[in-house]
Image (tube, rainbow, N blue to C red):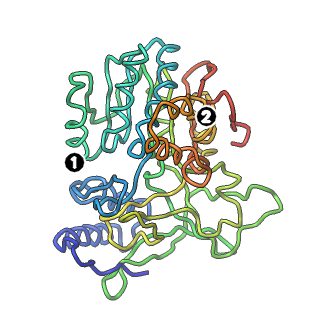
Amino acid sequence: MAAAAVPPGADADFSAAMQALLRQAIDDAGGWLPFDRYMSLVLYAPGLGYYANSLRKFGTMPQQGSDFVTAPELSPLFGQALARQVSQALTVSDTRTVIEFGAGSGALAEQLIETLDALGTPLESYQIVDLSGTLRERQAQRLARFAPRVQWLDQWPTEIHGVLVANELLDAMPVQLLHWTGRQWRERGVEMDGQGQLCFADRPTTARPPTPPEADMTFVPGTVTEVHAQAEAFVRTLADHLKRGAAFFIDYGFPESEYYHPQRTGGTLMCHHLHRADPDPLSLPGQKDITTHVNFTGIALAGQEAGLTVLGYTSQAHFLMNCGLVDLMEHADIAQRSMAHRLIAEHEMGELFKVIGFVPGDEFDAIGFQRGDRSYML
């Protein structure tokens, strides 16, 4: 699969710089770059990676030059509902700090700070960890009125005493790609073909291969799927730092029994550009998003093995309704109700997106998981 030519209107200098970076990385790696390393470069390389460059990401319409919309951008009621769960967790843990990883445009931070103030659990500190200097600038402008409560961190705090939130973070973490030949698993990577174009190539792998959900099932030859070593490592690191409080991850994905079902032969990797999805991560590197669905069973096990307790796991629809979204919609105008409905509609975000919560000690009766908890499915 070769890389696409630079489209009309694209920055040719930018494209050439990214291609040069990838060519050098492939050469330095001996001619073959594991996909997780490729994904890391095209998403996060300083100044060039998708999340590190100045291209617009978030918005509701392609005419805005944006690529996709997230729940906080879609409706402020998302953050207002989530704030009720965060408020409970802050109260239970007797903390007043929220830390957000990957804060995007700052919309969720704005919604949480405002609503927590209104709920009577005002924050002493809202800390943001974001790799993108461009996004940090946008966040700083949007959140200026909350200074000095908002701070930006360059690394994990030594200890976290508070509530961590992350919306659509895990799906953007680099993954390993594995290909089942019918006899063995091979790791998929990226190399340059004879014309100097990016293409896929497979090599032997040392990655732990997935197993089908039932003993009598077998993978179809040609299956390609993902392994989420970096996302699971992130959760283990969280366990090392979270001393008091809770953590909530909102993302799209499945439990392992669905994720690695033999009928899912193409995996879940997908790209987003101008509100259109495509399956080709080798075209327009650095100019479009690359994501995969989350294996929530792997995330849960990583947390448990590192000492965390799973607080709950459910669909975004159940979680937000448990947190009072329906009541919030009753007091909203028609346009706001329409947008908020997409957060819970089964054919929109309601069922595809899931929420998983962790605590470092004993669990509490978290309001977001009171009805519809699916922890038994993990």
Residue 232 visible in the picture:
no
Residue 298, image quadrant: top right
Q: Which residue position is annotated with label 2?
A: 305
Residue 174, image quadrant: bottom left
Disc 1 and disc 2: Cα gap in Å?
36 Å
Image height of 6 relative to 63, above or below: below
Q: Quadrant of the image for the N terminus?
A: bottom left
Determine whether the residue tagged by mark 2 lies in a helix, strand or loop: helix
Residue 49: x and y in percent read 28, 58
Q: Which one is nearer the viewer's eye here, 288 or 316? A: 316
Q: Identify which amino acid the numbered label 1 is placed on.
A: Thr
Q: Quadrant of the image for the C terminus?
A: top right
Q: Identify which amino acid the numbered label 2 is placed on.
A: Glu
Q: Which residue position is annotated with label 1?
A: 134
Q: Which one is nearer the viewer's eye here, 328 or 254? A: 328
Left or right, residue 298 beside residue 150:
right
Image height of 281 relative to 311, above or below: below
| Residue at 65%, 70% in the rendered image | 184
Q: Residue furthest right?
A: 216
Left or right, residue 227 beside residue 115:
right
N-terminal of the pair, mark 1 or mark 2, is 1
Residue 130: x and y in percent read 31, 41
Image height of 126 relative to 305, above or below: above
Residue 92 is labelled as: none
Determine whether the residue tagged by mark 1 lies in a helix, strand or loop: helix
